[in-house]
């Protein structure tokens, strides 16, 4: 009988006893050096770098469903590092540099395509904000440049720059090294790499409790497949971090929201770059399969829904159809919502917690996919050393006590 590993894993049935041993998730051992909760891109990247960079191979990645089946399978593929604040520039630029060589590093094609990310300005405020971004990025050695409306259209011919638009294009900021990658390939690449280094990736294994010893330190996790002992536990489960951390009696400064996205029917190549608009809160690119990938904003209500509100999609499509009139007659193929964790300053939390041995990586909002390699790299170092990696240090949980916030809520275009 022929088996498709991709189909089996996507069905969440990789432990089926009738399948060949090489297609099954391993049975969890009773103890590991490190347990990583969440087999999305960030969790798998963390496990890979723990093994490769720090020699810690006795690692289990636990996933309640199948690997890459959460937000990693629901993102809109955009990669960029043109953030405003120095702390954000550092983590996202670190990630972008890893993206640039990731296919070679993992010996797996993640389909990274540096086609450029262009952010449109529609009013005087947009122009001032994006020019500020350009100057700040150049000071940090990050590429970014300002385009006139005519230069923006030359870079992206389908763009409508008529002055009669509801949202006229006054210019744009372009990061040429930005672009896209295959939305779930990064998880598959890191999974293969971690597996080769001896990491156990255990699917259909939901964490139901975090065990603590008499002194309050982590001593393992309870799962639907039994108790697993570990002195270090890293939680990297987008959208459900607050639920998991509550198991260790920790309340996190995050809220969960559905984030809207959709794709059109596939068409021939027509859109050469990624186009983003902060005022409209919409962004668009074209996948290698020909679909137009369109992202919208978050729903205003906290929820774990993976659908979101149709009114948000409708507003986004109206604006996209005005900026790109040639797309008006295309049909929407599917619509979905990913669950994102959002912090008060719209920046992630990476680091230690008040519980010894418990580490957390969460709160990426809409910036999670683009950060995947950098996030996994610095989180692995934090877990291995027991103290924050220098790039991760500003994103500690303690900043909500000290007030040293990284306010990307006001700085980043289209949220993240």
Image (cartoon, rainbow, N blue to C red):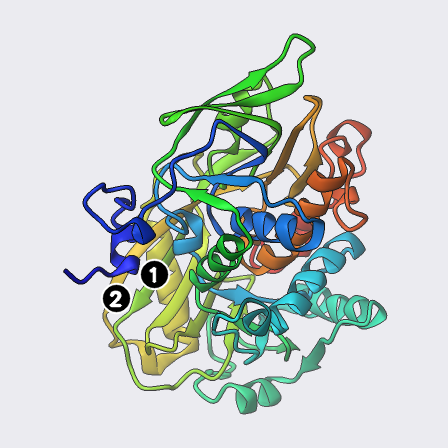
Secondary structure beneath dot 1 equals strand
Position of residue 85 measured from the top left corner of the image (x, y, whole percent): 77, 55
The single residue placed furthest to the front in the displayed view is: 21
The residue shown at (64%, 77%) is 177
Quadrant of the snapshot with the N terminus: bottom left
Between residues 45 and 123, which one lies in front from this camera angle?
Answer: 45
The residue shown at (47%, 49%) is 40
Q: Is residue 74 visible?
A: no
Vertical arrangement, residue 261 with respect to residue 46, above or below: below
Between residues 195 and 129, which one lies in front from this camera angle?
Answer: 195
Q: Is residue 239 visible?
A: yes
Quadrant of the snapshot with the C terminus: bottom right
Vertical arrangement, residue 180 with respect to residue 362, above or below: below
**3D distance between C-alphas at marks 2 and 1:** 7 Å
User: Residue 4 appears in which quarter of the rendering?
Assistant: bottom left
The single residue placed furthest to the right in the displayed view is: 139
The single residue placed furthest to the top in the displayed view is: 214
Position of residue 262 measured from the top left corner of the image (x, y, whole percent): 34, 61
User: Residue 178 appears in which quarter of the rendering?
Assistant: bottom right
The residue shown at (47%, 83%) is 159
Relative to residue 1, is residue 246 drawn left or right?
Answer: right
| Residue corresponding to mark 1 | 262
Return the mark for residue 332: 2
Secondary structure beneath dot 2 equals strand
Between residues 2 and 362, which one lies in front from this camera angle?
Answer: 2
User: Residue 56 appears in which quarter of the rendering?
Assistant: top right
Position of residue 118 measured from the top left corner of the image (x, y, whole percent): 58, 75
Position of residue 41 measured from the top left corner of the image (x, y, whole percent): 50, 53
| CB within 8 Å, label 2 to label 1 | yes
Dot 1: within a 10 Å radius of its alpha carbon, few (fewer than 14), some, or many (20 or more) residues?
many
Vertical arrangement, residue 279 with respect to residue 401, above or below: below
Vertical arrangement, residue 154 with respect to residue 317, above or below: below
């Amino acid at each position: 009988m022929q088996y498709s590993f991709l189909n089996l894993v996507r069905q969440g049935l990789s432990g089926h006893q009738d399948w060949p041993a090489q297609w099954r998730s391993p049975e969890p051992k009773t103890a590991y050096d490190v347990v990583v909760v969440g087999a999305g891109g960030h969790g798998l990247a963390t496990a890979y770098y723990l093994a490769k960079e720090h020699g810690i191979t006795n690692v289990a990645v636990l996933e309640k469903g199948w690997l890459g089946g959460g937000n990693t399978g629901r993102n809109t593929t955009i990669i960029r590092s043109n953030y405003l604040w120095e702390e954000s520039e550092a983590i996202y630029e670190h990630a972008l540099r890893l993206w640039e060589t990731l296919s070679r590093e993992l010996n797996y094609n993640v389909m990274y395509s540096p086609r450029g990310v262009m952010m449109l300005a529609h009013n005087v405020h947009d122009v001032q904000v994006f020019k500020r971004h350009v100057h700040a990025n150049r000071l940090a050695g990050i590429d970014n440049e300002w385009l006139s409306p005519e230069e923006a259209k030359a870079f992206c011919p389908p763009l409508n720059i008529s002055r009669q638009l509801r949202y006229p294009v006054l210019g744009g900021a372009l990061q040429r090294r930005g672009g896209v990658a295959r939305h779930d390939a990064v998880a598959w690449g890191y999974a293969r790499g971690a597996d080769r280094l001896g990491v156990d990736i255990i699917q259909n294994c939901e964490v139901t409790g975090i065990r603590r010893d008499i002194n309050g330190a982590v001593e393992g996790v309870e799962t639907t497949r039994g108790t697993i002992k570990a002195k270090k536990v890293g939680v990297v489960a987008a959208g459900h971090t607050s639920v998991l951390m509550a198991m260790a009696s920790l309340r996190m400064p995050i809220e969960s929201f559905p984030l809207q996205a959709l794709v059109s029917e596939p068409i021939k190549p027509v859109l050469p770059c990624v186009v983003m608009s902060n005022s409209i809160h919409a962004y668009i690119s074209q996948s290698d399969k020909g679909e137009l990938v369109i992202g919208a904003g978050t729903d205003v209500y906290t929820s774990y829904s993976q659908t979101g509100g149709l009114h948000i999609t409708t507003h986004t499509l109206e604006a996209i159809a005005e900026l790109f009139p040639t797309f008006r007659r295309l049909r929407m193929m599917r619509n979905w919502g990913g669950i994102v964790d959002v912090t008060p300053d719209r920046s992630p939390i990476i680091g230690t917690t008040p519980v010894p041995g418990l580490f957390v990586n969460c709160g990426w909002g809409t910036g999670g996919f683009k950060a995947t390699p950098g996030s996994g790299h610095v989180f692995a170092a934090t877990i291995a050393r027991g103290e924050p990696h220098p790039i991760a240090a500003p994103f500690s949980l303690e900043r909500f006590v000290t007030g040293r916030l990284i306010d990307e809520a006001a700085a980043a275009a289209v949220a993240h």
